[in-house]
Amino acid sequence: MPTDSPLTLLGGLTAAEFLHDYWQRKPLLIRGAFPDFESPLDPDELAGLACEEGVEARLVEEDGPDGPWQVSHGPFDEAVFGELPERDWTLLVQAVDHYVPEVAELLANFDFLPRWRLDDIMISYAPPGGSVGPHVDQYDVFLIQGLGKRRWQLGGKVADDAPILGGIDLRILERFEVEPGDDWVLEPGDMLYLPPGWAHHGVSQSDDCMTYSVGFRAPSADEAITSFADYLGEQLPASLRYGDAGMAPPADPAELDDASLERMRRLILATLDDPAQLAQWFGRVMTQPKYPDQLVPSERPTDVDALVAILQDGEELLRSPGSRFAWRAGEGERATLFVDGDGIECALPLARALAADTPLDADLLLLEGAAELLARLLDAGSLGWYDEEE
Ligand code: SIN
Ligand code: CO
């Protein structure tokens, strides 16, 4: 995607300008980001998804039968929706892009960001007054108004330890003060970008309010350090350990002296400071599927010749919804293709083609190693046949 043309999606900013001035720094309201936006999903279809096994859905009732801000988790019985009050509740469904191809197509608009930063598209539905309360997310989010109206109020950047309401299942801020001017009603096609840590409060202003949240995740230092250490730990030999050959006699045998700490520090830093291992771990961790259980490996290994014949017959393979792909260049024309938490060495053009949006058809077979790699990904469940998905 060119980064130097003004984008309607970004209110006439170029991707480079948006990334420089707003991304991770400050909110941006874009009126008409999606001109003539038509919600690919209607409220009944969203409620239908929330009733399906395996779909992550929540219902938030501000004045629930069992107390304020009551949260219940799906899958729901359809009857639940008939029993809800006329106002002040919200249904939230995660990862709708995994289930509705027309929703997944919205993601192409965000190709100015690394794909592996994407979390999912969550869609909310609310009658008048419905909200999840003033809160803070740790994600970057683009809030697209899909149907009806929602009033958004922003409360500025909030400290990590800002007090939250106790005794409920939601993280609602105890104090929320609207910054002057940061108060808008969004209509279909309008979009609000919010960086992490920015207090916000969105309240439905219409009978049928649907909001699409395109969320981008970033691993915390806590998760990253633990996960990288685990990844390295599995590969380090038992013989690589603290060593103190040549040390001076200790002044006091009970003391942890500076020299001992320095030996330990060097061992840890030398082990962690390995760019090749870091790349292998990072690619794996950022392509872990959101719902690993939804990956369905094939029952029998794919016969590579049969796969080639099917592709040559005009069939296409599909990337499984929810499968994540990324690549990193290696030496020469080689690369590592990362798929759903795995790292596979292959030819660079093949890695690029698989991680892009290009069709997976017989043309791919011109690339070195393609048939074997496609068979492997089909077996892992990261790819499927086009017909099976229809
Ligand atoms: C909503 O769509 O109701 C909530 C989205 C959010 O605040 O993150
Ligand atoms: Co939020």
Image: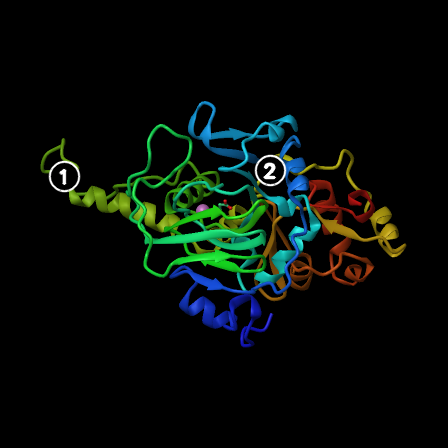
Image height of 105 relative to 175, above or below: below
Q: Nearer the viewer, residue 22 or 274?
A: 22
Q: Quadrant of residue 132?
A: top left
Of the numbered discs 2 and 1, the one sitting upstream in the chain is: 1
Q: Percent from the top left, x then y, of residue 68?
A: 41, 29
Q: Quadrant of residue 232?
A: top left
Query: Badge 1: how crowded within 10 Å, few (<14), some, or many (20+)?
Result: few
User: Would the CB of label 1 be found within 8 Å of ligand 2?
Assistant: no
Residue furthest out toward the right = 313
Which residue occupies 26% across, 42% down?
245
Q: Visible in this render: residue 314?
A: yes
The residue wearing badge 1 is 249
Which residue occupies 49% across, 37% down?
88
Q: Which mark is residue 292?
A: 2
Which residue occupies 87% across, 56% down?
314
Q: Which mark is residue 213?
A: none
Spatial CA distance of label 2 from label 1 is 53 Å
Residue type, mark 1 in image: Pro
Residue type, mark 2 in image: Pro
Front tag of 2 and 1:
2
